[in-house]
Image (cartoon, helix red, strand yellow):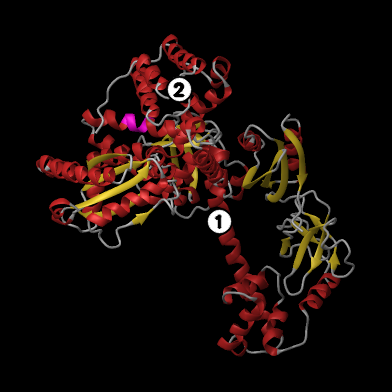
């Protein structure tokens, strides 16, 4: 367990010189230290920042990461700004400090697995530069070390649980075993001190004996390899407390853990790894099914090594790992090794590290390709506020959030039944914008329900989705009840018996014909006017009547003067009718549109210019947008940008400022440009055009095209 020892800037520079002696880089590291001294950063924070830099130096990261680590407390301590750091240092350094500042604002709210998965995605989604994750992990490691002498057991367990469920999986994915292993031991020490101390005591009681046996086995393997002309180094170790604990949790007893003793052999060539394991097996019998070839089949975090367990000296079981020096660097430092191998590594290793780094960048970027990560960008990359419940619990929300956002963050039931809100003891409207440090008290009523108007002012996607879910469920029930009523009236009109129509066989036939799930879906489709009751009945009575004929006759015979339509699209001659927006051309409010009567599936709405309907003369019907609709529509645009900087964050930021939600992002890289394909949610064509105009004013934009899928 590493002790927390304060470092000086001379220590940092001396350690950096061990792998880089670039004067400009060293001057910048020293400049960062002088900057925080001049700005009078608290001595405690200065010592912490230097220790974080020291941890990162063990990974041999680049100077930009070291400088950002030294500066990483400047923005959160309000002694500097992104703009100042950009001016004094450079944009990369300022960006890293800004990212780590935002990451450190989020924390695990509870011990639920879903919350941990969410926070992992949040942190990775916010870290457009992977080096920010290195700083975060080093920052947490130093903080966990500093808790060693703390008497606040509650804080220790809270930090340990968050570290174990959120940050250690990230360290594993990055392949940084050096940090991951120590964090695991610290987490066990703080969450299960009795278990930790019991294992440590047993190890200490037998440490001398184990060290003697390890030395004897090490000497034996050294003799074998030397006799065969293999250049090597060998280290012996007792397994970590946490790795032993993991074995004990599987039900094994202490006396059954034979592979506590471990040896690691380092050789120069990959071929010597296989030769070495063969020589060891020729003298010491391997344990069946314990040989693992992670060289031919590397782990997803780049780890490569040969693993075997053998019956060694005195019949003890030893775990032996064999790897090259480069493999060991990557095993301990993971993706962080990219920067040290960028200059000194073999071409093969350089190519491997470039490939793995690019893979991780793609993983981070592809995490945007779902609602969660897009919402992270829309909400968590904006300025956050911190408000309180009456009990003093802190709730983090995006700036501009309302009491309704607060209520749904507490619980969906609280949100659904909200009737009033008090902020700092005063009654406020439900669209009131909350401020930092507000105390919010939500008043609920058991039989209260959400209001659709809330969708016009809520800020968080969580609240918006909960409100929509409620109304979708209510509207579905309304359609089902209406459909059942229409269906039963039609049966009576035809002088049929409902029990004879809705037999099990007949219902099964209807479901199969229409590809529906249950009787409620039949009623829903009738109630939403997707199918007529007469058509449903004709399926089982075998009346020859086309659903298209039914729909066309309805259109030509029914006239309506209704003006308060509920649906987004008004169909000529009918008004409200269930329609589907065509996915081939993604029409949005404001586009010129046309309706197409499909076979048995109602009316599909296309852009008038859509290639799928432009040459059709039959089954087309006039439709128009409902001027009173307030829903969002999906639009897909291709944004072609110049090669160079990653402009995705800027694009996402501008979408957020325009109140446009991004549902998905895909990236395609070409020789001279990068194309981002964005799936957006917009209110209308004007809103989309305004967003496109904002982007077109950016110097990095080459071309923007609204895309159709056909």
Q: Is residue 63 above or below residue 31?
A: below
Q: Quadrant of the N terminus?
A: top left
In terms of secondary structure, where does tag 1 sit?
Answer: helix
Quick one: label 1 or label 2, which is nearer the N terminus?
Answer: 2
Coordinates of residue 56 in the picture (x, y in percent): 40, 28
Coordinates of residue 680 in the picture (x, y in percent): 67, 46
In front here: 372 or 619?
Answer: 372
- Residue at 39%, 40% in the rendered image: 268
Q: Would you name the residue on which mark 1 appears?
A: 469
The crowd level at tag 2 (other Cα within 10 Å; few <14, some 14-19, many 20+) is some
Q: Is residue 396 visible?
A: yes
Q: Main secondary structure of the magenta part?
A: helix
Q: Which residues are magenta?
A: 139-143
In the visual, does 191 lie left or right of 518?
left
User: Between marks 1 and 2, how big is the CA–CA gap?
Assistant: 57 Å
Coordinates of residue 387 in the picture (x, y in percent): 44, 33
Q: Is residue 482 above or below residue 273?
A: below
The reply to whether dot 1 and dot 2 touch (C-beta < 8 Å) is no
In the visual, does 595 lie left or right of 132?
right
Q: Would you name the residue on which mark 2 appears?
A: 20
Residue 15: quadrant of the picture: top left
Query: Which of pointers 1 and 2 indicates the residue nearer the eye?
Result: 2
Coordinates of residue 245 in the picture (x, y in percent): 22, 49
């Amino acid at each position: 367990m590493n002790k927390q020892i304060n470092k000086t800037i001379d220590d940092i520079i001396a350690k950096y010189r061990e792998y880089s002696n670039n004067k400009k880089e060293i001057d910048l590291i020293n400049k960062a230290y002088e900057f925080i001294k001049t700005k009078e950063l608290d001595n405690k924070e200065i010592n912490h920042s230097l220790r974080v830099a020291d941890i990162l130096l063990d990974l041999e990261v680049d100077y930009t990461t070291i400088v950002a680590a030294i500066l990483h407390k400047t923005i959160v301590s309000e002694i500097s700004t992104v703009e100042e750091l950009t001016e004094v240092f450079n944009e990369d350094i300022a960006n890293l400090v800004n990212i780590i500042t935002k990451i450190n604002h989020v924390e695990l709210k509870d011990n639920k697995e879903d919350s941990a998965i969410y926070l992992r995605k949040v942190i990775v989604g916010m870290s457009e530069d992977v080096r920010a994750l290195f700083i975060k992990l080093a920052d947490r490691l130093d903080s966990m070390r500093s808790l060693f002498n703390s008497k606040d057991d509650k804080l220790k367990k809270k930090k340990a649980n968050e570290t174990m469920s959120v940050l250690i999986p990230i360290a594993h994915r990055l392949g940084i075993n050096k940090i991951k292993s120590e964090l695991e031991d610290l987490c066990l020490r703080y969450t299960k001190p009795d278990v930790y101390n019991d294992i440590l005591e047993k190890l200490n009681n037998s440490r001398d004996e184990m060290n003697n046996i390890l030395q004897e086995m090490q000497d034996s393997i050294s003799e074998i390899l030397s006799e065969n002309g293999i250049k090597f180094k060998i280290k012996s170790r007792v397994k970590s407390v946490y790795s032993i604990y993991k074995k004990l949790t599987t039900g094994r007893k202490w006396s059954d853990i034979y592979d506590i003793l471990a040896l690691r052999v380092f050789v120069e060539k990959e071929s010597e790894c296989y030769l070495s394991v063969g020589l060891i097996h020729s003298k010491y019998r391997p344990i069946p099914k314990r040989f693992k070839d992670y060289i031919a089949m590397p782990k997803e975090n780049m780890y490569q090594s040969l693993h075997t367990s053998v019956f060694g000296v005195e019949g003890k079981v030893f775990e032996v790992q064999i790897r090259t020096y480069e493999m060991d660097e990557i095993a301990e430092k993971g993706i962080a090794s990219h920067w040290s191998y960028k200059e000194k590594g073999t071409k093969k290793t350089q190519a491997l590290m470039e490939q793995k780094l690019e893979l991780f960048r793609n993983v981070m970027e592809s995490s945007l390709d779902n609602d969660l990560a897009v919402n992270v960008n829309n909400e968590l990359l904006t300025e956050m506020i911190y408000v309180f419940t009456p009990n003093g619990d802190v709730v983090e929300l995006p700036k501009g959030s309302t009491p309704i956002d607060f209520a749904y963050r507490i619980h969906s039931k609280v949100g659904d039944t909200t009737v009033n809100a008090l902020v700092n003891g005063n009654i406020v409207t439900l669209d009131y914008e909350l401020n930092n440090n507000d105390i919010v008290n939500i008043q609920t009523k058991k039989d209260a329900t959400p209001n659709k108007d809330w969708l016009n002012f809520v800020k968080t996607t969580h609240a918006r989705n909960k409100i929509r879910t409620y109304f979708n469920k209510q509207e579905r029930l309304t359609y089902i009840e209406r459909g059942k009523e229409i269906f039963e009236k039609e049966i009576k009109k035809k002088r049929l018996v409902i029990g004879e129509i809705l037999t099990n066989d007949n219902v099964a036939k209807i479901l199969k014909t229409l590809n529906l799930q249950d009787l409620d879906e039949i009623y829903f489709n009738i109630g939403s006017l997707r199918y007529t009751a007469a058509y449903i009945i004709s399926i089982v009575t075998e009346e020859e009547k086309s659903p298209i004929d039914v729909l066309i006759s309805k259109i030509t015979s029914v006239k309506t003067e209704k003006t308060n339509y509920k649906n987004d699209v008004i169909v000529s001659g009918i008004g409200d009718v269930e329609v589907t927006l065509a996915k081939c051309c993604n029409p949005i409010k404001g586009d010129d549109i046309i309706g197409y009567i499909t076979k048995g599936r109602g009316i599909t709405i296309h852009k008038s210019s859509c290639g799928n309907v432009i040459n059709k003369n039959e089954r087309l019907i006039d439709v128009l947008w409902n001027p009173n609709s307030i829903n969002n529509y999906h639009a897909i645009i291709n944004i072609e940008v110049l090669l160079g900087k990653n402009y995705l964050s800027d694009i996402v930021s501008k979408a957020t400022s325009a109140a446009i939600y991004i549902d998905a992002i895909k990236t395609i890289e070409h020789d001279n440009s990068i194309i981002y394909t964005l799936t957006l949610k917009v209110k209308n064509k004007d809103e989309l055009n305004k967003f496109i105009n904002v982007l077109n004013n950016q110097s990095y934009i080459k071309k923007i095209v609204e895309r159709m899928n056909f």
